[in-house]
Image (cartoon, helix red, strand yellow):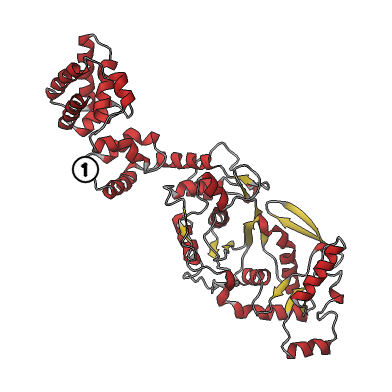
Amino acid sequence: MTQDIRVRFAPSPTGPLHIGGVRTALFNYLFAKQNKGTFILRIEDTDQNRYVPGAEEYIKNALDWCNIPFDEGPGKDGGFGPYKQSERKDLYRQYADELIKNGSAYYAFDTTETLDAHRKDHEAKGKTFIYNWHNREKLNNSLSLTPDEVNSKLSSGNPFVIRFKSPQDETLHLTDEIRGDIKIDTNILDDKILFKSDGMPTYHLANIVDDHLMKISHVIRGEEWLPSMALHVLLYRALGWNAPKFAHLPLILKPIGKGKLSKRDGDKLGFPVFPLQWEDPKTQDISSGYKEDGYLPEAVVNMLAFLGWNPGTEQELFSLEELIEKFDLKRVNKAGAKFDPEKTKWFQQQHLQKMDNTILSKQFETLLSDKNITTALDLNTIITTVKERATFINDLWSLTQFYFLSPSEYDEKAVKKAWKEDTPILMHELTRILNDITDFSENNISSIVKGWITGKEIGFGKIMMPLRIALVGSLQGPDLFQIAALIGKTETIKRIENAIEIN
Protein backbone atom coordinates (compact mmCIF):
# COMPACT_ATOMS: atom_id res chain seq x y z
CA MET A 1 0.00 0.00 0.00
CA THR A 2 1.42 3.38 -0.98
CA GLN A 3 -0.69 5.66 1.24
CA ASP A 4 -0.04 6.07 4.93
CA ILE A 5 -2.27 3.69 6.83
CA ARG A 6 -4.19 5.47 9.58
CA VAL A 7 -7.08 3.77 11.33
CA ARG A 8 -9.12 4.76 14.35
CA PHE A 9 -11.16 3.19 17.10
CA ALA A 10 -13.83 5.69 18.08
CA PRO A 11 -15.94 4.55 21.05
CA SER A 12 -18.42 6.65 23.01
CA PRO A 13 -17.73 6.89 26.77
CA THR A 14 -21.23 5.76 27.73
CA GLY A 15 -20.25 2.75 29.86
CA PRO A 16 -17.86 -0.21 29.89
CA LEU A 17 -16.29 -1.39 26.66
CA HIS A 18 -18.06 -4.51 25.34
CA ILE A 19 -15.87 -7.26 23.86
CA GLY A 20 -17.45 -6.39 20.50
CA GLY A 21 -15.78 -3.00 20.82
CA VAL A 22 -12.51 -4.62 21.85
CA ARG A 23 -12.72 -6.86 18.76
CA THR A 24 -13.17 -3.73 16.58
CA ALA A 25 -10.17 -2.10 18.26
CA LEU A 26 -8.13 -5.30 17.79
CA PHE A 27 -8.86 -5.58 14.06
CA ASN A 28 -7.94 -1.91 13.58
CA TYR A 29 -4.74 -2.45 15.55
CA LEU A 30 -3.76 -5.59 13.62
CA PHE A 31 -4.39 -3.91 10.28
CA ALA A 32 -2.39 -0.82 11.28
CA LYS A 33 0.57 -2.77 12.62
CA GLN A 34 0.71 -5.15 9.66
CA ASN A 35 0.91 -2.13 7.34
CA LYS A 36 3.27 -0.14 9.57
CA GLY A 37 0.47 2.34 10.10
CA THR A 38 -1.01 4.32 12.98
CA PHE A 39 -3.73 3.18 15.38
CA ILE A 40 -5.72 6.11 16.77
CA LEU A 41 -8.11 6.32 19.70
CA ARG A 42 -10.78 9.00 19.33
CA ILE A 43 -13.37 9.56 22.04
CA GLU A 44 -16.74 10.41 20.49
CA ASP A 45 -18.40 12.23 23.37
CA THR A 46 -20.64 14.75 21.61
CA ASP A 47 -23.67 13.30 23.42
CA GLN A 48 -22.94 14.68 26.88
CA ASN A 49 -26.29 13.42 28.21
CA ARG A 50 -25.05 9.83 27.90
CA TYR A 51 -21.52 10.48 29.18
CA VAL A 52 -20.56 8.15 32.04
CA PRO A 53 -17.73 9.16 34.41
CA GLY A 54 -14.84 6.70 34.33
CA ALA A 55 -15.78 5.21 30.95
CA GLU A 56 -12.98 6.92 29.02
CA GLU A 57 -10.33 5.74 31.47
CA TYR A 58 -11.85 2.25 31.34
CA ILE A 59 -11.47 2.20 27.53
CA LYS A 60 -7.78 3.13 27.76
CA ASN A 61 -7.12 0.58 30.52
CA ALA A 62 -8.88 -2.16 28.54
CA LEU A 63 -6.75 -1.51 25.43
CA ASP A 64 -3.59 -1.50 27.54
CA TRP A 65 -4.55 -4.77 29.25
CA CYS A 66 -5.11 -6.40 25.85
CA ASN A 67 -1.67 -5.15 24.76
CA ILE A 68 -3.18 -3.15 21.89
CA PRO A 69 -2.33 0.42 22.99
CA PHE A 70 -3.11 3.36 20.71
CA ASP A 71 -0.38 5.34 18.94
CA GLU A 72 -2.34 8.60 18.94
CA GLY A 73 -5.19 9.68 21.15
CA PRO A 74 -5.95 11.54 24.38
CA GLY A 75 -2.60 12.14 26.07
CA LYS A 76 -0.66 10.99 22.95
CA ASP A 77 -0.88 13.84 20.45
CA GLY A 78 0.40 12.93 17.02
CA GLY A 79 -0.37 16.33 15.49
CA PHE A 80 -4.03 15.61 14.70
CA GLY A 81 -5.61 16.38 18.09
CA PRO A 82 -7.57 17.05 20.08
CA TYR A 83 -8.85 13.46 20.13
CA LYS A 84 -12.05 14.05 22.07
CA GLN A 85 -14.97 15.36 20.04
CA SER A 86 -16.17 17.56 22.90
CA GLU A 87 -12.88 19.47 22.52
CA ARG A 88 -13.38 19.79 18.75
CA LYS A 89 -16.97 21.09 18.70
CA ASP A 90 -15.99 24.50 17.30
CA LEU A 91 -14.69 22.76 14.15
CA TYR A 92 -17.95 21.30 12.93
CA ARG A 93 -20.25 24.24 12.32
CA GLN A 94 -18.11 25.61 9.49
CA TYR A 95 -18.55 22.37 7.56
CA ALA A 96 -22.29 22.34 8.15
CA ASP A 97 -22.40 25.90 6.82
CA GLU A 98 -20.36 24.85 3.81
CA LEU A 99 -22.89 22.11 3.04
CA ILE A 100 -25.73 24.63 3.22
CA LYS A 101 -23.81 27.02 1.01
CA ASN A 102 -23.23 24.41 -1.72
CA GLY A 103 -26.82 23.14 -1.58
CA SER A 104 -26.06 19.81 0.07
CA ALA A 105 -27.82 20.62 3.35
CA TYR A 106 -30.63 22.86 4.59
CA TYR A 107 -32.12 24.42 7.71
CA ALA A 108 -35.16 22.63 9.13
CA PHE A 109 -37.44 24.42 11.63
CA ASP A 110 -39.97 21.63 12.17
CA THR A 111 -40.99 21.13 15.79
CA THR A 112 -40.98 17.74 17.48
CA GLU A 113 -44.76 17.94 17.82
CA THR A 114 -45.22 18.60 14.08
CA LEU A 115 -43.01 15.68 13.08
CA ASP A 116 -44.78 13.37 15.57
CA ALA A 117 -48.11 14.38 14.02
CA HIS A 118 -46.78 13.52 10.53
CA ARG A 119 -45.57 10.13 11.73
CA LYS A 120 -48.89 9.28 13.36
CA ASP A 121 -50.78 10.38 10.25
CA HIS A 122 -48.63 8.13 8.05
CA GLU A 123 -49.00 5.20 10.46
CA ALA A 124 -52.78 5.60 10.38
CA LYS A 125 -52.61 5.24 6.60
CA GLY A 126 -50.30 2.22 6.81
CA LYS A 127 -47.28 4.18 5.65
CA THR A 128 -43.88 5.11 7.09
CA PHE A 129 -42.92 8.75 7.45
CA ILE A 130 -39.46 9.50 6.04
CA TYR A 131 -38.10 13.04 5.94
CA ASN A 132 -36.58 13.13 2.44
CA TRP A 133 -37.11 14.13 -1.20
CA HIS A 134 -40.68 12.84 -1.08
CA ASN A 135 -41.93 15.48 1.33
CA ARG A 136 -39.13 17.87 2.34
CA GLU A 137 -40.39 20.74 0.17
CA LYS A 138 -43.78 20.53 1.94
CA LEU A 139 -42.25 20.81 5.41
CA ASN A 140 -40.94 23.73 7.44
CA ASN A 141 -37.40 24.18 6.12
CA SER A 142 -35.21 26.40 3.98
CA LEU A 143 -36.20 24.44 0.85
CA SER A 144 -39.88 25.32 1.20
CA LEU A 145 -39.50 28.82 2.69
CA THR A 146 -38.35 31.98 0.93
CA PRO A 147 -34.88 33.35 1.72
CA ASP A 148 -36.49 36.22 3.64
CA GLU A 149 -38.54 33.80 5.75
CA VAL A 150 -35.44 31.73 6.48
CA ASN A 151 -33.40 34.79 7.48
CA SER A 152 -36.24 36.01 9.67
CA LYS A 153 -36.42 32.68 11.52
CA LEU A 154 -32.65 32.57 11.98
CA SER A 155 -32.38 36.16 13.21
CA SER A 156 -35.33 35.60 15.56
CA GLY A 157 -33.52 32.70 17.19
CA ASN A 158 -36.03 30.06 16.08
CA PRO A 159 -34.72 26.56 16.95
CA PHE A 160 -33.43 24.67 13.92
CA VAL A 161 -31.46 21.65 12.84
CA ILE A 162 -29.34 21.22 9.74
CA ARG A 163 -30.32 18.27 7.56
CA PHE A 164 -28.41 16.64 4.73
CA LYS A 165 -30.16 16.82 1.37
CA SER A 166 -30.05 13.25 0.11
CA PRO A 167 -29.94 13.02 -3.70
CA GLN A 168 -32.98 11.82 -5.60
CA ASP A 169 -33.14 9.09 -8.27
CA GLU A 170 -29.52 7.98 -7.99
CA THR A 171 -27.95 4.56 -7.55
CA LEU A 172 -24.92 4.70 -5.30
CA HIS A 173 -22.16 2.17 -6.00
CA LEU A 174 -20.25 1.53 -2.80
CA THR A 175 -17.37 -0.83 -2.01
CA ASP A 176 -16.82 -2.52 1.33
CA GLU A 177 -13.51 -4.29 1.89
CA ILE A 178 -15.32 -7.23 3.49
CA ARG A 179 -18.71 -7.28 1.76
CA GLY A 180 -17.72 -6.25 -1.74
CA ASP A 181 -19.90 -4.10 -4.00
CA ILE A 182 -23.08 -2.59 -2.57
CA LYS A 183 -25.79 -0.71 -4.47
CA ILE A 184 -28.02 1.83 -2.73
CA ASP A 185 -31.08 3.57 -4.15
CA THR A 186 -30.83 7.12 -2.78
CA ASN A 187 -34.63 7.45 -2.86
CA ILE A 188 -34.85 5.28 0.25
CA LEU A 189 -32.46 7.46 2.27
CA ASP A 190 -33.79 9.96 4.76
CA ASP A 191 -32.36 13.43 5.23
CA LYS A 192 -30.32 12.85 8.37
CA ILE A 193 -29.76 15.60 10.89
CA LEU A 194 -26.14 16.79 10.79
CA PHE A 195 -26.34 19.60 13.33
CA LYS A 196 -28.65 19.61 16.34
CA SER A 197 -30.63 22.48 17.81
CA ASP A 198 -28.30 22.53 20.83
CA GLY A 199 -25.40 23.56 18.61
CA MET A 200 -23.70 20.17 18.63
CA PRO A 201 -23.02 18.01 15.57
CA THR A 202 -24.53 14.57 15.24
CA TYR A 203 -22.33 11.51 14.96
CA HIS A 204 -22.57 11.58 11.16
CA LEU A 205 -21.07 15.03 10.59
CA ALA A 206 -18.52 14.90 13.41
CA ASN A 207 -17.37 11.44 12.33
CA ILE A 208 -16.78 12.49 8.72
CA VAL A 209 -15.02 15.73 9.59
CA ASP A 210 -12.75 14.06 12.13
CA ASP A 211 -11.86 11.16 9.84
CA HIS A 212 -10.95 13.62 7.09
CA LEU A 213 -8.91 15.96 9.28
CA MET A 214 -7.13 13.03 10.95
CA LYS A 215 -6.34 11.57 7.50
CA ILE A 216 -8.00 8.23 8.24
CA SER A 217 -7.26 5.83 5.38
CA HIS A 218 -9.54 2.94 6.42
CA VAL A 219 -12.69 2.96 8.51
CA ILE A 220 -12.96 -0.48 10.14
CA ARG A 221 -16.07 -0.62 12.31
CA GLY A 222 -18.99 -2.79 13.35
CA GLU A 223 -21.76 -4.00 11.07
CA GLU A 224 -24.28 -1.79 12.87
CA TRP A 225 -22.77 1.20 11.02
CA LEU A 226 -23.26 -0.34 7.56
CA PRO A 227 -26.59 1.50 7.00
CA SER A 228 -24.74 4.81 7.56
CA MET A 229 -22.14 4.11 4.89
CA ALA A 230 -24.20 5.64 2.07
CA LEU A 231 -24.71 8.91 3.96
CA HIS A 232 -21.04 9.09 4.90
CA VAL A 233 -19.88 8.55 1.32
CA LEU A 234 -22.35 11.23 0.16
CA LEU A 235 -21.03 13.64 2.80
CA TYR A 236 -17.48 13.10 1.60
CA ARG A 237 -18.62 13.80 -1.93
CA ALA A 238 -20.56 16.89 -0.92
CA LEU A 239 -17.52 18.34 0.86
CA GLY A 240 -15.23 17.54 -2.06
CA TRP A 241 -13.12 15.07 -0.10
CA ASN A 242 -11.82 11.61 -0.96
CA ALA A 243 -13.54 8.97 1.15
CA PRO A 244 -11.51 6.40 3.07
CA LYS A 245 -11.98 2.70 2.43
CA PHE A 246 -14.69 1.06 4.52
CA ALA A 247 -14.79 -2.36 6.17
CA HIS A 248 -17.77 -3.42 8.29
CA LEU A 249 -17.09 -6.26 10.73
CA PRO A 250 -19.70 -8.97 11.40
CA LEU A 251 -21.75 -8.98 14.58
CA ILE A 252 -20.74 -11.10 17.57
CA LEU A 253 -23.75 -13.32 18.16
CA LYS A 254 -25.20 -14.96 21.27
CA PRO A 255 -23.98 -18.51 22.03
CA ILE A 256 -27.26 -19.83 20.60
CA GLY A 257 -26.39 -18.07 17.34
CA LYS A 258 -29.34 -15.67 17.14
CA GLY A 259 -29.13 -12.01 18.09
CA LYS A 260 -26.28 -9.75 19.17
CA LEU A 261 -24.27 -10.79 22.24
CA SER A 262 -25.27 -8.72 25.27
CA LYS A 263 -24.38 -8.35 28.94
CA ARG A 264 -27.60 -10.19 29.75
CA ASP A 265 -26.28 -13.27 27.94
CA GLY A 266 -23.14 -13.20 30.06
CA ASP A 267 -25.10 -12.79 33.28
CA LYS A 268 -27.41 -15.65 32.32
CA LEU A 269 -24.73 -18.11 31.24
CA GLY A 270 -21.96 -17.05 33.62
CA PHE A 271 -19.27 -15.49 31.42
CA PRO A 272 -17.93 -11.91 31.11
CA VAL A 273 -18.71 -9.65 28.18
CA PHE A 274 -16.34 -6.89 29.32
CA PRO A 275 -12.52 -7.03 29.31
CA LEU A 276 -12.20 -5.52 32.80
CA GLN A 277 -14.46 -5.38 35.82
CA TRP A 278 -16.84 -2.41 35.76
CA GLU A 279 -18.61 -0.69 38.62
CA ASP A 280 -21.57 1.40 37.55
CA PRO A 281 -21.06 4.88 39.06
CA LYS A 282 -24.82 5.34 39.54
CA THR A 283 -25.98 1.97 40.83
CA GLN A 284 -22.63 0.62 42.12
CA ASP A 285 -23.51 -2.65 40.36
CA ILE A 286 -20.36 -4.61 39.50
CA SER A 287 -19.96 -6.47 36.22
CA SER A 288 -17.22 -9.08 35.94
CA GLY A 289 -14.34 -8.78 33.52
CA TYR A 290 -12.06 -11.26 31.77
CA LYS A 291 -9.04 -9.96 33.68
CA GLU A 292 -10.63 -10.43 37.10
CA ASP A 293 -12.00 -13.84 36.10
CA GLY A 294 -8.43 -15.01 35.56
CA TYR A 295 -8.13 -14.91 31.77
CA LEU A 296 -4.81 -14.06 30.15
CA PRO A 297 -4.95 -11.09 27.74
CA GLU A 298 -3.24 -13.25 25.10
CA ALA A 299 -6.10 -15.76 25.31
CA VAL A 300 -8.80 -13.08 25.08
CA VAL A 301 -7.12 -11.46 22.07
CA ASN A 302 -6.70 -14.85 20.35
CA MET A 303 -10.37 -15.65 21.00
CA LEU A 304 -11.57 -12.27 19.70
CA ALA A 305 -9.46 -12.56 16.55
CA PHE A 306 -11.35 -15.72 15.62
CA LEU A 307 -14.74 -14.04 16.03
CA GLY A 308 -15.22 -13.22 12.37
CA TRP A 309 -11.74 -13.90 10.99
CA ASN A 310 -9.81 -17.03 10.11
CA PRO A 311 -6.25 -17.46 8.84
CA GLY A 312 -7.18 -19.96 6.14
CA THR A 313 -5.15 -22.70 7.86
CA GLU A 314 -5.71 -25.19 10.68
CA GLN A 315 -3.73 -23.04 13.12
CA GLU A 316 -5.82 -21.68 16.00
CA LEU A 317 -3.26 -20.57 18.58
CA PHE A 318 -1.68 -17.24 17.75
CA SER A 319 0.49 -14.78 19.59
CA LEU A 320 -0.22 -11.10 18.97
CA GLU A 321 2.84 -10.93 16.72
CA GLU A 322 1.56 -13.86 14.66
CA LEU A 323 -1.87 -12.25 14.35
CA ILE A 324 -0.26 -9.05 13.07
CA GLU A 325 1.63 -11.07 10.47
CA LYS A 326 -1.36 -13.13 9.28
CA PHE A 327 -4.30 -10.71 9.61
CA ASP A 328 -6.11 -9.89 6.36
CA LEU A 329 -9.40 -8.03 5.95
CA LYS A 330 -10.15 -10.28 2.98
CA ARG A 331 -10.40 -13.20 5.39
CA VAL A 332 -12.97 -11.51 7.64
CA ASN A 333 -16.38 -13.16 7.27
CA LYS A 334 -19.59 -11.37 6.36
CA ALA A 335 -21.78 -13.60 8.53
CA GLY A 336 -22.12 -13.06 12.27
CA ALA A 337 -19.70 -14.89 14.56
CA LYS A 338 -21.24 -17.04 17.32
CA PHE A 339 -19.64 -16.53 20.71
CA ASP A 340 -18.63 -19.78 22.42
CA PRO A 341 -17.80 -19.53 26.16
CA GLU A 342 -16.26 -23.02 26.19
CA LYS A 343 -14.01 -22.20 23.25
CA THR A 344 -12.88 -19.12 25.16
CA LYS A 345 -11.86 -21.37 28.06
CA TRP A 346 -10.02 -23.59 25.58
CA PHE A 347 -8.00 -20.62 24.33
CA GLN A 348 -7.24 -19.73 27.94
CA GLN A 349 -6.11 -23.25 28.77
CA GLN A 350 -3.91 -23.45 25.69
CA HIS A 351 -2.23 -20.11 26.34
CA LEU A 352 -1.63 -21.03 29.97
CA GLN A 353 0.17 -24.17 28.78
CA LYS A 354 2.37 -22.02 26.51
CA MET A 355 3.16 -19.58 29.30
CA ASP A 356 6.76 -19.57 30.51
CA ASN A 357 6.99 -21.33 33.88
CA THR A 358 9.26 -18.63 35.28
CA ILE A 359 6.59 -15.99 34.69
CA LEU A 360 3.88 -18.35 35.89
CA SER A 361 5.86 -19.08 39.07
CA LYS A 362 6.00 -15.37 39.93
CA GLN A 363 2.24 -15.03 39.54
CA PHE A 364 1.68 -18.21 41.54
CA GLU A 365 3.95 -16.86 44.27
CA THR A 366 1.69 -13.80 44.50
CA LEU A 367 -1.34 -16.09 44.77
CA LEU A 368 0.35 -18.02 47.62
CA SER A 369 1.27 -14.78 49.34
CA ASP A 370 -2.39 -13.73 49.26
CA LYS A 371 -3.10 -16.95 51.17
CA ASN A 372 -0.32 -16.16 53.67
CA ILE A 373 1.73 -19.12 52.49
CA THR A 374 5.50 -18.88 52.35
CA THR A 375 7.50 -21.79 51.03
CA ALA A 376 11.00 -22.84 50.11
CA LEU A 377 9.70 -25.43 47.64
CA ASP A 378 10.61 -25.18 43.96
CA LEU A 379 7.48 -23.56 42.46
CA ASN A 380 8.71 -24.02 38.91
CA THR A 381 8.92 -27.79 39.33
CA ILE A 382 5.62 -27.94 41.25
CA ILE A 383 3.82 -26.08 38.46
CA THR A 384 5.30 -28.47 35.89
CA THR A 385 3.65 -31.43 37.67
CA VAL A 386 0.10 -30.02 37.35
CA LYS A 387 0.19 -27.39 34.62
CA GLU A 388 -1.45 -29.50 31.92
CA ARG A 389 -4.59 -29.84 34.07
CA ALA A 390 -4.92 -26.10 34.78
CA THR A 391 -7.06 -23.62 32.85
CA PHE A 392 -6.58 -20.59 35.08
CA ILE A 393 -3.72 -19.56 37.34
CA ASN A 394 -6.10 -19.88 40.29
CA ASP A 395 -6.52 -23.56 39.36
CA LEU A 396 -2.92 -24.09 40.34
CA TRP A 397 -3.86 -23.68 43.98
CA SER A 398 -6.52 -26.39 43.98
CA LEU A 399 -4.17 -28.65 42.02
CA THR A 400 -1.12 -28.10 44.24
CA GLN A 401 -2.33 -27.15 47.72
CA PHE A 402 -1.26 -30.56 49.09
CA TYR A 403 2.37 -29.55 48.42
CA PHE A 404 2.05 -26.72 50.91
CA LEU A 405 -0.55 -28.01 53.38
CA SER A 406 -0.52 -31.47 54.93
CA PRO A 407 -3.95 -33.15 54.54
CA SER A 408 -6.12 -32.56 57.61
CA GLU A 409 -8.93 -34.73 56.30
CA TYR A 410 -9.18 -37.55 53.80
CA ASP A 411 -11.60 -38.38 51.01
CA GLU A 412 -14.01 -40.92 52.52
CA LYS A 413 -14.61 -42.87 49.33
CA ALA A 414 -10.87 -43.07 48.67
CA VAL A 415 -10.17 -44.30 52.21
CA LYS A 416 -12.89 -46.91 51.98
CA LYS A 417 -11.47 -48.14 48.69
CA ALA A 418 -7.76 -48.14 49.55
CA TRP A 419 -7.31 -48.35 53.34
CA LYS A 420 -7.54 -52.02 54.35
CA GLU A 421 -6.96 -53.87 57.62
CA ASP A 422 -3.27 -54.48 56.94
CA THR A 423 -2.61 -50.97 55.55
CA PRO A 424 -1.28 -49.47 58.83
CA ILE A 425 1.33 -52.28 59.12
CA LEU A 426 2.43 -51.80 55.51
CA MET A 427 2.57 -48.00 55.92
CA HIS A 428 4.72 -48.30 59.06
CA GLU A 429 7.09 -50.56 57.17
CA LEU A 430 7.14 -48.06 54.29
CA THR A 431 8.18 -45.24 56.62
CA ARG A 432 11.16 -47.31 57.75
CA ILE A 433 12.12 -47.90 54.09
CA LEU A 434 11.81 -44.18 53.30
CA ASN A 435 13.75 -43.15 56.41
CA ASP A 436 16.73 -45.22 55.29
CA ILE A 437 16.89 -43.53 51.85
CA THR A 438 19.82 -41.10 51.67
CA ASP A 439 19.27 -39.82 48.10
CA PHE A 440 15.66 -38.67 48.36
CA SER A 441 15.27 -37.93 44.65
CA GLU A 442 12.26 -38.93 42.59
CA ASN A 443 13.98 -41.68 40.61
CA ASN A 444 15.76 -43.16 43.61
CA ILE A 445 12.62 -43.20 45.79
CA SER A 446 10.70 -44.83 42.94
CA SER A 447 13.34 -47.49 42.41
CA ILE A 448 13.66 -48.44 46.10
CA VAL A 449 9.93 -48.41 46.93
CA LYS A 450 8.96 -50.36 43.80
CA GLY A 451 11.72 -52.86 44.50
CA TRP A 452 10.43 -53.31 48.05
CA ILE A 453 6.83 -53.82 46.80
CA THR A 454 7.98 -56.36 44.23
CA GLY A 455 10.06 -58.18 46.84
CA LYS A 456 7.05 -58.49 49.14
CA GLU A 457 5.05 -59.92 46.23
CA ILE A 458 2.03 -57.69 46.92
CA GLY A 459 0.00 -55.62 44.49
CA PHE A 460 1.22 -52.10 43.86
CA GLY A 461 -2.25 -50.77 44.70
CA LYS A 462 -1.93 -51.96 48.32
CA ILE A 463 0.91 -49.45 48.80
CA MET A 464 0.47 -46.75 46.19
CA MET A 465 -3.19 -45.93 46.88
CA PRO A 466 -2.83 -45.52 50.67
CA LEU A 467 0.42 -43.62 50.11
CA ARG A 468 -1.39 -41.20 47.79
CA ILE A 469 -4.16 -40.73 50.37
CA ALA A 470 -1.52 -40.01 53.01
CA LEU A 471 0.34 -37.44 50.92
CA VAL A 472 -2.57 -35.81 49.04
CA GLY A 473 -5.75 -36.62 51.00
CA SER A 474 -7.39 -38.22 47.97
CA LEU A 475 -6.58 -40.43 44.99
CA GLN A 476 -5.79 -37.39 42.80
CA GLY A 477 -2.55 -35.69 41.88
CA PRO A 478 0.66 -36.15 39.89
CA ASP A 479 3.31 -38.85 40.27
CA LEU A 480 3.65 -39.87 43.94
CA PHE A 481 7.43 -40.00 43.88
CA GLN A 482 7.52 -36.47 42.43
CA ILE A 483 5.39 -35.31 45.35
CA ALA A 484 7.55 -37.11 47.93
CA ALA A 485 10.79 -35.74 46.47
CA LEU A 486 9.44 -32.19 46.40
CA ILE A 487 8.02 -32.09 49.95
CA GLY A 488 11.05 -33.97 51.33
CA LYS A 489 11.68 -37.01 53.48
CA THR A 490 10.62 -35.54 56.82
CA GLU A 491 7.29 -34.20 55.55
CA THR A 492 6.57 -37.42 53.61
CA ILE A 493 7.05 -39.63 56.67
CA LYS A 494 5.13 -37.20 58.87
CA ARG A 495 2.12 -37.34 56.51
CA ILE A 496 2.15 -41.14 56.39
CA GLU A 497 2.24 -41.36 60.19
CA ASN A 498 -0.60 -38.83 60.45
CA ALA A 499 -2.71 -40.85 58.01
CA ILE A 500 -2.10 -44.04 60.01
CA GLU A 501 -3.22 -42.30 63.20
CA ILE A 502 -6.39 -40.79 61.72
CA ASN A 503 -7.50 -43.65 59.50
In the image, residue 241 above or below residue 5: below
Query: Which residue is nearer to you in this view: 317 or 14?
Result: 14
> In front here: 439 or 287?
287
Left or right? Give the position of 12 relative to 460: right
Along the viewing direction, whichever of 137 and 329 lies nearer the viewer = 137
Q: Position of residue 95 (x, y in %)?
A: 69, 78
Rendered residue at 27%/40% (across/down)? 379
In the orientation shown, which residue stands out farthest toward the top?
Answer: 457
Quadrant in which the N terminus appears: bottom right
Number of marks? 1
Q: Return the x and y of residue 192 as percentages of the image width and height.
A: 74, 70
- Kindly identify the residue that appears in the image at 55 percent across and 68 percent down: 43
The relative height of residue 250 versus residue 42 in the rendered view (above or below) is: above
In the rendered image, which residue does mark 1 sit on?
375
Q: Residue at x 86, y 71 (%)?
A: 135
Which three-letter amino acid code belongs to the residue tagged 1?
A: Thr
Give the x, y percent position of residue 300: 49, 48
Question: For the residue labelled by badge 1, is the local secondary structure a helix, a strand or a loop?
Answer: loop
The answer to whether any part of residue 103 appears in the image is yes
Residue 165 appears anywhere in the view: no
Identify the residue at horizontal 79%, vertical 64% (top origin): 189
Image coords of residue 234 (percent x, y): 75, 67
